[in-house]
Amino acid sequence: MKALSPLLPWLGVMKERRGRLLLGGVLMLATLASALGLLSLSGWFITATAVAAMTGAYLDVFAPGGGIRFFAVSRTVSRYLERLYNHDTVLRLLADLRSRVFRGLVVLDARTLSRVRASQWLNRLTADIDTLDNLYLRLLAPPLVALIGIVGFALFAMAFLPSAGIAILALLLPLWLAVTLGCAWWGWRASHRRVERQERLRVRTIEQIEGLAELTAYGALETHRRHWRREERILLDDQRRLGRRTAAGNALMTLGVQSTTLLVLMLGLLAFQQGAVSGPVMVMLALGTLAVSEGLGNLPMAFVQFGATQRSAERLNEQTALRPALVGEPLTTGGAAPALAYLEVDVRHGERRVFVDLTLTLAAGERVAIVGTSGSGKSTLAQLAVRAFDPDAGSVTFEGHDIATIDPDSLRARIGYLTQRSELFHDTLAANLRMGAPEASDERLWWALEQVELRAWAETLPQGLETWIGEQGRQLSGGQARRVALARVMLRDSPLVILDEPLSGLDSGTAERLKATLDDWLGERTALLLGHDEAALPRCDRYWRLVPGAEGTRLEGDVSHP
């Protein structure tokens, strides 16, 4: 039961589609029943025909012939419907599972998310959930159907030859336990650790691809490759081990079914010699026993991988157990430009002290520029303001309210935030812009594009605003993507604006014109502008420089704009 407990929450999700699951199981059972009927009746019919030919007895060939045709057609149809229906059900279940996991993921704060690499979160959302498709399609319905098939055929055999039915139960029930629970126990350890090792290999692969230049420059490429090859070798060893155990399980299943078939045939021969059963019935029972292998055939492979399913469920349970750390009450203030203040703020990232007793205030309607090198903490200031995470000590206030007491969604609805990265999605230009203002009209979108000097370009696109821009905006240049992200912020029309490197990736002429446009657009808004250089930002009222030090980053050089 301890091994099954991680699966219980996901069985609960599947229970929501119990009607489809039940129908899928019925289709599996119908397929197995057709296979049993086809082989059993064919054996009876062929033997009865031979006996009739030798003895000259009368035999009605139409009824059994019709039965054989029925079972042949029903087996084909039920198999097709079962595969089609059950795979559709599994895809629906995977969508349900992904929705549940993703809903839990999007409410987590940035600090919680940063504990695990993005590739690992993605691995849980894709590979771990994909592994759970084994739960119904291989680990629940097939063994139950096989068990029903064994018991059902044994009872059928008992009606003709009780000893044959008892032999089937005596041999095939332990065999069923061996290829399910036995294979699960035998392959559990290797398949359980395979999940972690696959993830580590994926992470190292991504690291090598994305960091190829840095690894080459520092002469660490060969060392990294050795680690990568070691991870690959360990994973392949486990996969080979699981492959051998699957093959052994299949061999055991085949040997067990064929031994049972031989035993049933011998019991049938003895009964035939004693006149207890006819020759056709003797053959029918033996071939029907052989047909039971169709229900048992896929069980060793499925249950050898049980540990992977169990470990994936454990990992997903760990993720869904995480709760949003950021809660609070909705803001009730209006849309006027707010004051923003950082009061004796301490922030740590791991062992690194980013800020210690940092204090900074932005009056309502004031523009403040923060300049500094990469890694000095500029983006951390922005993330604190939008409450991506809370400071370790001190407080950040919005219009006099400690943002630790404010609902994050309510706070972010009043902030227009341009992140350092231009986050664009594989959708139309209009859809990407409307992420800033879902109700914006086409005229409003054209206005925003004009503000960032993209209207003329957008008018030349084949579908205009409905043109797809590709994953991460790959159909756009870096400067165009940056301006689309900036246009999205402008559409929000928020009273507090945070712009992190707003003019990066732009040529000097375009940057100067956009600085003037932003100067007009910011108007009376409160603005926090972040950049590497004062010259790369619109006009501000005050300029501060972040200077990293051993005791954390400090602010220097508060210079009022003339």
Image (spheres, rainbow, N blue to C red):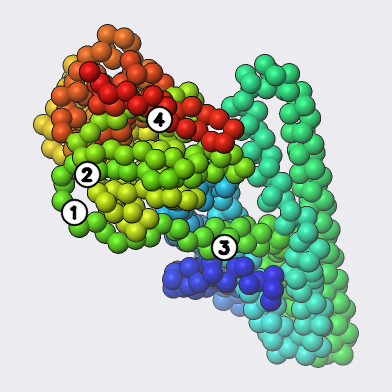
Snapshot quadrant of residue 155:
bottom right
- State the residue position of label 1: 333
Residue under pointer 2:
338
Cα separation between marks 1 and 3: 39 Å
Q: Position of residue 35 (x, y in %)?
A: 63, 68
Residue lying farthest to the left in this orientation: 443
The vertical placement of 496 against 522, above or below, is below
Q: Nearer the viewer, residue 57 or 258?
A: 258
Mark 1 or 3: the one toward you: 1
N-term-proximal mark, 3 vs 2: 3
CA separation in Å, label 4 and label 1: 28 Å
CA neighbours of label 2 inside 10 A, class few (<14), some (14 to 19), many (20+): many
Looking at the image, do the residues carrying marks 4 and 1 touch, with CB atoms under 8 Å apart? no
From the image, tell me which residue sits under label 3: 317
The span from disc 4 to disc 3 (Cα, nearest Å) is 32 Å
Which residue carries the number 4 mark?
420
Determine the CA span between mark 3 and mark 2: 41 Å
Q: Residues within 10 Å of mark 4 (few under 14, many from 20)?
A: some
Q: Earlier in the sequence, mark 1 or mark 3?
A: 3
Q: Nearer the viewer, residue 259 or 316?
A: 316
Q: Is residue 491 left or right of residue 353?
A: left
Q: CA distance from mark 2 to mark 1?
A: 9 Å
| Vertical placement of residue 407 versus 14, above or below | above
Q: Amino acid at mark 3?
A: Asn
Residues at circles 2 and 1 in contact by the CB criterion of under 8 Å: yes
**Which element is circle 3 on?**
helix
Q: Residue at x 59, y 53 (%)?
A: 128
Callout 2 amino acid: Pro
